[in-house]
Image: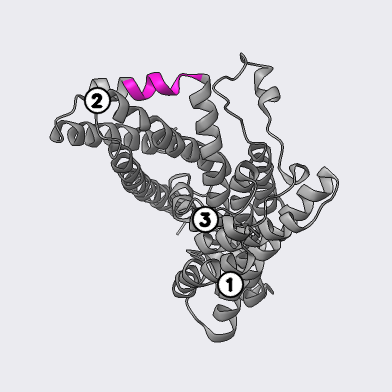
């Protein structure tokens, strides 16, 4: 019973601390916390806002799963950002050059994105297994190469043919045919709700994100590969003694993480129809925070992704109402992550102490039973 109480106390404690710290921050900035929270919740209660939250949570969740695959093997894939941007660019370029039936067109785009993301993440895996380069250093460097090098160069090489009409603001790849755009799923949601207004479209990539979460759970917890990956992360020396090849597992984990990262850009690609001059950035780093908050658990990461998306989307109403600055959402995201880490750390420390105490009591009882 105490174990369940500790498991429940950690998220509840994190929530309470987040509300307290955020309230103090709002008061320090001269804002009314009640009005600010009320405006955010009122805005989030609208169906159209909920569609925006789901659309925003989808790439957050995919990014979190990509990071979590590495975390489960004690690998810190900080390069999700660069991996999804490079994969986004290649998938958009190839998708704009081909014309296929809808199912095949979408499938090709997704496979290209996953393959490119996997190969780019594999570079960090090769550097680690062949030269012992720490993956944190290599993935940060690869992020810089992706954003400051590959994207800038390849966008110039692959820009759409626009002749005299070309300007810097229209830089991007060739638009993808309608057959290559992932369909929206408004109709599926409207079965349970009213018609969605304001031209809002619920991305069909939400279903892909759910599928990725299910496969992540099955792969990590129900397969031999998942057991080997987790064992290598917990104790690589024992795993090696058990016949698990550590270098192969490192490379496999990095490439699998990169493959999931490649799907992040497909969410924006389905919405904008090409690689734009101003793609959404920062999703890779947000995913790391979501994975940490969700404890690498598929359900926990889904909740964390929705929470971060809620703060992102609902905070926009604060500017229009004047209740507070929308930057309070950034503060709340940081606070909720920090308090969650602290709360889970305290809960784990108490759990370990209880387990050690129970083991000591069991050993003492056994010695009393055994005659001298």
Nearer to us of marks 1 and 2 is 2
Nearer to us of marks 3 and 1 is 3
Counting from the top left corner in percent of width and height, residue 174 is at 67, 55
Q: Label 3 vs label 2: CA separation?
A: 33 Å
Counting from the top left corner in percent of width and height, residue 223 is at 72, 55
Q: What is the magenta range?
A: 39-46
Residue 93 is drawn in which quadrant? bottom right
Identify whether 188 is placed above or below 162: above
**Quarter of the image with the N terminus in it:** top left
Q: Earlier in the sequence, mark 3 or mark 1?
A: 1
Judged from the image, the secondary structure of the residue bearing numbered disc 3 is loop
Residue drawn at point x = 57 percent, y = 19 percent: 197
From this viewpoint, which residue is outermost toward the front? Answer: 164
Judged from the image, the secondary structure of the residue bearing numbered disc 2 is loop
In magenta segment, residue 45: yes
Label 3 belongs to which residue? 277
Counting from the top left corner in percent of width and height, residue 137 is at 44, 74
Label 1 belongs to which residue? 238
Nearer to us of marks 3 and 2 is 3
Q: Is residue 244 visible?
A: yes
Judged from the image, the secondary structure of the residue bearing numbered disc 1 is helix
Q: Residues within 10 Å of mark 1 (few under 14, many from 20)?
A: few
């Amino acid at each position: 019973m105490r174990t369940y109480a500790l498991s429940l106390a950690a998220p509840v404690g994190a929530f309470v601390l987040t509300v307290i710290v955020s309230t103090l921050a709002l008061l320090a900035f001269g804002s009314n916390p009640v009005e600010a929270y009320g405006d955010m919740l009122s805005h989030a209660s609208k169906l159209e806002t909920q569609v925006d939250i789901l659309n925003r949570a989808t790439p957050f969740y995919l990014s979190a799963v990509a990071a979590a695959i590495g975390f489960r093997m004690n690998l810190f894939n900080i390069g999700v950002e660069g991996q999804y941007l490079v994969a986004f660019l290649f998938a958009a370029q190839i998708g704009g050059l081909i014309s296929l039936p809808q199912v095949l067109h979408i499938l090709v785009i997704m496979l290209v994105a996953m393959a490119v993301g996997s190969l780019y993440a594999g570079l960090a895996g090769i550097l680690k297994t062949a030269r012992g380069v720490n993956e944190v250093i290599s993935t940060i460097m690869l992020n810089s190469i992706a954003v400051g090098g590959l994207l800038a160069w390849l966008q110039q090489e692959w820009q759409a043919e626009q002749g005299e009409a070309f300007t810097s603001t229209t830089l991007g790849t060739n638009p993808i045919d309608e057959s290559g755009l992932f369909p929206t799923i408004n109709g599926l949601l409207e079965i349970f709700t009213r018609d969605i207004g304001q031209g809002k479209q619920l991305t069909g990539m939400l279903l892909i994100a759910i599928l990725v979460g299910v496969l992540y759970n099955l792969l990590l917890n129900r397969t031999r590969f998942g057991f080997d990956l987790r064992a290598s992360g917990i104790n690589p020396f024992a795993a090696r003694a058990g016949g698990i090849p550590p270098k192969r597992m490192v490379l496999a984990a990095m490439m699998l993480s990169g493959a999931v990262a490649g799907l992040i850009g497909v969410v924006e690609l389905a919405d904008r129809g090409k690689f734009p001059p101003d793609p959404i950035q920062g999703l890779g780093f947000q995913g790391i925070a979501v994975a940490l908050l969700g404890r690498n658990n598929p359900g926990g990461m889904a909740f964390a992704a929705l929470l971060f998306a809620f703060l992102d989307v609902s905070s926009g109403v604060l500017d229009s109402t004047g209740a507070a600055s929308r930057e309070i959402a950034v503060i709340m995201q940081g606070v909720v992550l920090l308090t969650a880490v602290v709360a889970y750390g305290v809960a784990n420390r108490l759990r370990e102490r209880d387990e050690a105490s129970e083991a000591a009591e069991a050993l003492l009882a056994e010695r009393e039973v055994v005659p001298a």
